[in-house]
Amino acid sequence: MDNRKIYFILILIIYCSCSQAKRISSNSYGDSGTGRETHVSVKFNQLPKELILLDRKDDELDPIRTLIFQGVPGSRQEKPLIPIKDQLRFEKSDTYNYISKNASRFINEEYSTFNKIAINLHLLRQYLEKEKVIKTFGL
């Protein structure tokens, strides 16, 4: 075999084994009171900005609850969507019941994987604004 072919194959193998996906953020935070830890990991230029990627739990509503009641540090939604003082009242509302029964409406399956769930933050926020649970930004 020609030396140039050997060098080319060797360089190609080294290049392929050294390349990695760039990451925007990789954060972890504790789920208050339960001791469970959730990780947020977004690959560079792959996830539309209206989506947030969270760990998939047994219940697909769990990541949505995290966004609504806790927020996700290091993401576009660092603070809870619902203020702490209003959370108990919200949990008993028809709006929360609708979200609980229709959680899949706010999940983007195209970007979800077996261990990550992509939540459409824009749709969730839009629904909460329509139901007058949260105020429209800037008003």
Image (cartoon, rainbow, N blue to C red):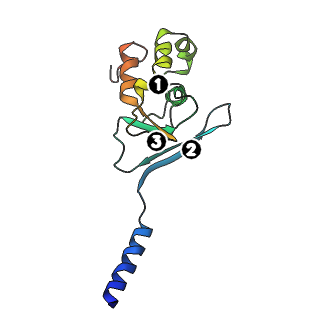
Residue 86 x/y as whole percent: 53, 15
Q: Quadrant of residue 59?
A: top right
Q: Earlier in the sequence, mark 1 or mark 3?
A: 1
- Circle 1/circle 2 CB separation < 8 Å: no
Question: Which numbered marker is on residue 129?
Answer: none
Secondary structure beneath label 2: strand
Residue 135 seen in this snapshot: no
Query: Badge 2, how many Cα within 10 Å: few under 14, some, many 20+?
Result: some
Q: What residue is at 37 percent from the left and 51 percent from the top?
A: 44
As shown in the figure, which amino acid type bears the numbered disc 3? Thr
Q: CA distance from mark 1 to mark 2?
A: 19 Å
As shown in the figure, which amino acid type bears the numbered disc 2? Ser
Question: Which numbered marker is on residue 113?
Answer: 3
Residue 69 x/y as whole percent: 54, 25
Foreground residue among 84 and 5 = 5
Q: What residue is at 35 percent from the left and 34 percent from the top?
A: 50
Residue located beneath label 2 in the image: 28
- Circle 1/circle 3 CB separation < 8 Å: no
Q: Earlier in the sequence, mark 3 or mark 2?
A: 2
Residue located beneath label 1 in the image: 81
Q: Quadrant of residue 111?
A: top left
Secondary structure beneath label 1: loop
As shown in the figure, which amino acid type bears the numbered disc 1? Leu
The image shows residue 129, relative to residue 49, as above or below, that is above
The image shows residue 45, relative to residue 92, as above or below, that is below
Q: What residue is at 47 percent from the left and 25 percent from the top?
A: 81
Residue 125 x/y as whole percent: 39, 24
